[in-house]
Amino acid sequence: MQIEEKKIDEEIQGQATMLESKNPSGKKLYLESYGCQMNFSDSEVVASILIDQGYSTTKDVEEADVILMNTCSIRENAEQRVRNKLSQHNKRKKQNPSLVIGILGCMAERLKKDLLEQEKLVDLVAGPDAYRDLPNLISEVETGQKAVNVLLSREETYADIAPVRLDKGGVTGFISIMRGCDNMCSFCVVPFTRGRERSRDPQSIVAEAQDMFNKGYKEVTLLGQNVDSYKWNVTKKGEIIDPNQPTVSFAELMEKVALVDPALRVRFSTSHPKDMTDDVLHVMAKYENICKYIHLPVQSGNSEVLKRMNRGYTREWYLERIAAIKRIVPEAFISTDIITGFCGETEEQHQDTLSIMREVGYEFSYMFFYSERPKTLAERKFEDDIPLEVKKRRLSEVQEVQAELALEANSKTVGKTYEVLIEGISKRSDDFVYGRNSQNLTVIFPKGDHKPGDYVNVTIQEYTSATVKGIEAN
Ligand code: 5AD
Ligand code: SF4
C-alpha cells in the first residue's frame, strides 16, 4: 500500500500523536504509528475508541499511562525498528511499573508469543480487527494479566466509528474504505496480518467525507490495499446480496465522494493493475476534483517474475493499463512500487524492471529490496537466493533511474500553472508554504496572504527531483 512520502519517514521514526484532553483527570495515551497510511488511519479509530473511554492523548511519552505502538510487518527492517523502540519503552516501565505497553497492527498476530511470553516486552497485543476490545484488554492488564486479542474478522470495518483526526493540519485526511486483502501476492504478509478483504458501507464513507469537509478539510484520500476491488452489496462471485439495495463499485463510490463538494479533492490508493478498470479512469477524467494521480505498483517489469510474485498480470497487461491511463487521463502522474532481488530474479529480469520504468516514465516510485516474510507463499515455495549486496545494488540502479525520471518530469512543469492546495508552512522558511497540485507534486511558493487550506494558482519556476518551486500566478 502506498502511499505518501511521509510513509517512508514514519516507517523509520514512528510518529506520536496528541489531542487536547477531553477529560483532564483521565488517563493519558501515547499512540505511536509505523508503516503504511492504513495504520495511521487505524490509529485514528483507536484514538476515537479510547477517547470515548475518557482517555486523552499525549505527545510526551514520559506522562503516558498507556503506550500503544501501531506496528508494521511488511519488511523485516520495519519490525526491527519497532523492537528497538519497545526496548526503550520498557526502560520506562522499570521506573513506572503501572505503565501499560501494548502493540497493535500487523506485528500483533505474528509476534504475540515472542513479545508477550519470551521477551516480555509488552503487556497487551491487539490485532487490526480487535480495536473495539481495547478498553477490556487494558482493564485486564490493570488487574495484573497479559491481554491478547488477535482474532481477524470477516466483517469488521469500523464503519460506525468516527475517527479522531490526529493530524493537526486539518487540510488533508484519509478515509479507510475497505480492510484486508485477498490477493496473496507471494512476497506479501498483509493477507496474513490483516485478513480477508471486506468493503465498508458506502453511506458511512460519504458521510465521513461530508463531515470532514464541514470541518474544513479540503482533501480526502480513499484508502484500501486494492481499492479497485471495492464492492458493496455484491459477493466475490458477483452475486447481489440484497436485491432491494443498490450495488456500489469503486468507480461509483469515487463519484459519490467527488459529489460531496467540488472544493473537496479526492485521491485514492492503492490501485491494482489486474483490477483497475476504464470506468475508474473515466470517473477520474469527468470530475475536476478527483486528483489526476495514480499509484499503480508494478513490482517487477518481467512477466516471469510477476508470475512468481503471483501478481495476476504480465508486463504487457501492465503496459496496456498504462496506455489506458495516458489515453483517458492524459495529464495524470503515475507512481509505482518496485521490489528488487525477488527470488530467482536474473540480471536480465532486473533489466526489464529498469526498462519498464523508462517506458512508463514514472514521476515517483517507492523502491525496496526483497525481504522474505514468514508464512508467505514465497517463503514456502521459493528460495530467497539473491545475495543481499546484489539486491541492494539492483535497488540503487532502480533508484538512479527514478531520480532521472523525476528530474525529467519535474523539468517539464516549468512555466506551467497549477492549482495548489496549501498544506503547511515550509520547514525551511516561514515566508514559504507548501502544498500539492492535483498530480501529487509538492510545490513550494511564497506565502503572501495565504494560509493552509487555500487553493492558489502557482506558476512553476524551478525544480529538483523531489519538489518544484514557483510564484502565485497573476
Ligand atoms: N519485501 C520487500 N518489499 C515488499 N513489499 C511488500 N512486501 C515486501 C517484501 N516482502 C513492498 C511492495 C508493496 C509495498 C507496500 O511494499 O512493493 O507494494
Ligand atoms: Fe500485499 Fe499484494 Fe495485497 Fe498489496 S495487493 S497488500 S502487495 S497481497
Image: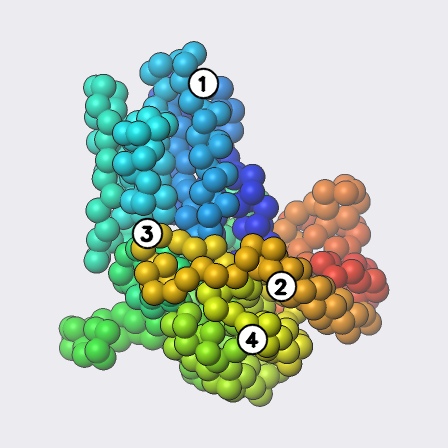
Where does residue 368 sit, x and y in percent of width and height? Answer: 55, 58
Comparing 92 with 469, the one in front is 92
Answer whether labels 3 and 2 touch (C-beta < 8 Å). no
Comparing 22 with 18, the one in front is 18
Task: Name the residue that disc number 4 marks.
Answer: 349
Task: Name the residue that disc number 1 marks.
Answer: 92
Task: Name the residue that disc number 2 marks.
Answer: 394
**Label 4: how many Cα within 10 Å (few below 14, some 14–19, many 20+):** some
Q: What distance separates the C-alpha of mark 2 from that of mark 4? A: 11 Å
* Three-letter residue code for mark 3: Thr
Q: What distance separates the C-alpha of mark 3 from that of mark 2? A: 28 Å
Tell whether circle 1 marks a residue whose Cβ is less than 8 angstroms from ligand 1: no
Name the image quarter holding residue 101.
top left
- Apparent side of residue 212 relative to residue 354 in the rendered image (left or right): left
Question: Which label's residue is closer to the chain start, 2 or 4?
Answer: 4
Q: Determine the secondary structure under disc 1.
A: helix
Question: Which label's residue is closer to the chain start, 3 or 1?
Answer: 1
Name the image quarter holding residue 91.
top left
**Label 3: how many Cα within 10 Å (few below 14, some 14–19, many 20+):** many
Tell whether circle 4 marks a residue whose Cβ is less than 8 angstroms from ligand 1: no
Comparing 166 with 215, the one in front is 166
Q: What distance separates the C-alpha of mark 1 from that of mark 2? A: 41 Å
* Three-letter residue code for mark 1: Arg
Q: What residue appears at the point 33 percent right and 16 percent down from the top-left corner? A: 98
Q: Determine the secondary structure under disc 3.
A: helix
Tell me the quadrant of the picture where the C terminus can be found: bottom right
Q: What residue appears at the point 64 percent right and 78 percent down from the top-left corner? A: 355
